[in-house]
Image (tube, grey):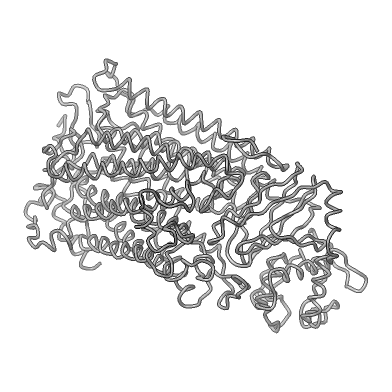
Amino acid sequence: MPQGLQLFPQQASTIAKHVDWLYFFLIAVTIFFATLVCVLVTFFMIRYRRGAKVDRSNPVNHSTTLELLWTGIPLVLAMVIFAWGAVLFYAIQTPGQGAMEIYVVGKQWMWKLQHPAGKKEINELHVPLGKRVRLTMTSEDVIHSFYVPAFRIKKDVLPGRYTTLWFEATKLGTFHLFCAEYCGLGHSRMIGRVVVMTPGDYEKWLSGGGNEEPLEVSGERLFQRLACATCHREDSKGRGPSLAGVFGTSVRLKSGASVVADESYIRESILEPQAKLTAGFDPVMPTFTGQLGEEGIIQLIAYIKSLARKPDSSAPPTPPTSH
Amino acid sequence: MESASNGHGHEHGHEHGHGGDHIHPPPSNFLTKYVFSTDHKVIAVQFFCMGFTMFLVGGLFALLLRWQIAYPFQPLPFGLGEVIYASAPGHTMPPESYPTLVTMHGTVMVFFVIIPLLTGAFGNYLIPLKIGARDMAFPLLNMLSYWVAVPAGVLIIMAFLSEAGGPGAGWTSYPPLSALPQASPGSGAGQTLWLLSIFCVGWSSIMGGINYLTTIINLRAPGMSLTRMPLSVWALFITSVLQVLATPVLAAASILLLFDKLLGTSFFLPAGINVGGQAIAQAGGGNPLLFQHLFWFYSHPAVYILVLPAMGLVSDIIPTFTRKPIFGYKAMAYSMAAIAGLGFIVWGHHMFQAGMNPYVATSFMVATMVIATPSSVKVFNWLGSLYGGSIRFTTPMLCCLAFVSMFIIGGLSGVFLAATPVDIFFHDTYYVVAHIHYVVFGGSVFGIFAGLYYWFPKVTGRKMSEFWGKVHFWLSFVSFNGVFFPMHILGIGGMMRRIADPTIYQHLAPLQSWNVYITMFAVVLGFSQFIVIANIAVSLLRGERVGENPWEATTLEWTTASPPPYYNYLQIPTVHHPPYEFSVPGMESDYIVQSAPPRSA
């Protein structure tokens, strides 16, 4: 990393250079206006100091043209910055198709990461170069914030809901991972790193170490162990709704409203089943609060997602989802 | 409120200029004269003393923070550690003190320094005098608003000294961190006292706002039409609208959080959270983001409560020292109203990184971008006010010039934070710290200094020393920039807020020398403030005595004695002129006070 004064840390993701172009444009606009105002203040101070022999015979106290001009120019500039920023912001917020999915759980004071194939890490995230990675994040306790300066990404990690973030690394190497939201006494030490590897090395790294099972397999086991399958049967005759193909679809609720069955909805339905009850079912499901940690919930979500992805012959045909 | 409105009916006669008959004698009892006074001038001075004392307290917190950042966990110089951290091992900062100091610095400076000084002190003193009234519409309510602020101040100090640990969740106090003592040692009794204090100080603010609005609407002297009001009165009027409409939301947020802490409710705690492996039994159904929405719905308008009155003071002072009317009076008033109006719909820009739907974020982004327009109109109009003037470089004028130049820097750095893609990087870094201090110190505090030097002769009948005023100004101005400009560089380098020890971050190692320089300038900035205190003290006793109008200014307060009598005006003045009639061609004097006889009549 270069020493001393630097305009930004290194760029190591696909979005970084786009963010930096907007940033450099803002620097140019800012320097122009700050200089303009400070130079004019100084110039007028000197020129119109008391006792200086200058023409004061026709003092201007109002000028509609000037006022329109200095209302209009900043407004147009602000709108240019807005349009540029908004377009870029959508691009940064939309992960697109086919991203590799990694789950992140923050807690006082560490990051726990789970790869889809089941590999778990703490405070370290290994990712392949040139592949889109989508992070689905939640917190066990207080609010944290996942911040990788070189990738120009940052997103709060909240308890009770999932936030997402994506990036595509463009450089091999190790990059800082910080918590940016004050989260208690150990906040400054909640430091991790992101290791970007070639896809080949990544595969090798994944297969190294213990033989972990994929998340959805752990989830399926948990599903059986907690006896979820007794009610959530595959044939839609159970006391609870069938979960096959439900992920990503719109669910009609008893209240008449409808909700998209995303990660946050599934999490809520496990912990607070009566909060958003599916239409046509009785409020018979007990809460699983206290029996499941965030990682267990993530495994269950991965399993339910897998039911949507690959409908097998025993499950009823599922409608194609847009997910 | 019933008796207060009767009081208004009683004062009604003054509006028609027959006030002479209704003058009450001043209270002769020491308690009712100086302590439990209903006189707006005394209450203003009380607010000033409280605010300035708290300014020193908040400044001391800042210096302790700066020492820690420059020299993490090293003993304070000159054996100060043995006094300040007497009970801590090694007499160095205990780790839990850092977040408490961060929290206390922000809370004290916002709620107990800038707001009480600008609205409580300057608002109280200037509104009745500038509109030609004898007092506020509700004098008793006015007294109450001060005497609610005092217990709030006591509570915040109690919170700081709380045995379980002072509040340490930041001045924003986001739950669940602030709600659960398990998550942070300061989130027990300390945080509870903090919430009670904020509730009380908010109450004081609402009472003040109601009073200022009523007074400005009802008690203006004959001829004081809205478009003849000095811009400071416009600014305080608009600020009062913000105080009355936004503060109740903060009160609601603090009550809900108190319930979560004390009554076992779960407004802000979602199901399934556990701290350190311990499940939180009461949690369920709540949403931590709700607190952020409520907090910022108040606290973004609060930023304008912090800066609009200062804009008003500066707009009053600049014409006096350029001997020229303010440029574009109407645009100045409209732009303040626009800033305040837009200020209500931009709170979400504090939450861009909190997982907000990008479409919602965009609506907050566009409103935030638009707010740059009225702000730049104001800056250009101040520039226009300098053009063609005859500038007198008094201390208040220097403070005003600093205000204009520092406010533009603070405003422009805000554009980076409004542009969401760039904000992703800057959010929660020192760049934000630099930005807010350019607005609130470079803007509001220099506005307060300008107001102090400018109205001190009116309040006391004596001028402050110009020489020491200029020494104080230049030391403050240079060291202010020395402290806060490098913070932009730290933010760009990726230094996060609220980290107790930057040296454990390898990427910040090349930047650590900046932290040392900043701390040196902070010490200069802190100690420079003793100059202004000494200047106030000495000037009170030995300052040059002045008459009614030492600055040859035009607004009404300069037509009565210095200090003004209890009843302000023997005869309620009648207003014939706009507020800034300077250097009118063809006139002998270069200024016309607002109550001077009409020219052509």
Left or right, B288 with respect to A306, comes to left
* Of residues B487 and B299, the one drawn nearer to the viewer in this rendering: B487
Quarter that holds the C terminus of chain A:
bottom right
Q: How many marks?
A: 0
The image position of residue A161, as x and y in percent, is 64, 65
Left or right, B134 with respect to A123, comes to left
Q: Quadrant of residue B533?
A: top left
Look at the picture and state if B512 lies above or below B346: above
Residue located 36% across and 44% down the image: B444
Look at the picture and state if B591 lies above or below B182: above
Residue located 40% across and 54% down the image: B105
Left or right, B512 with respect to B225, comes to right
Q: Quadrant of residue A267?
A: bottom right
The image position of residue A189, as x and y in percent, is 59, 56
The image position of residue B537, as x and y in percent, is 18, 45
Look at the picture and state if A2 lies above or below B365: above
Residue located 61% across and 62% down the image: A109
Left or right, B299 with respect to B574, comes to right
Quarter that holds the N terminus of chain A:
top right
The image position of residue B300, as x and y in percent, is 45, 52
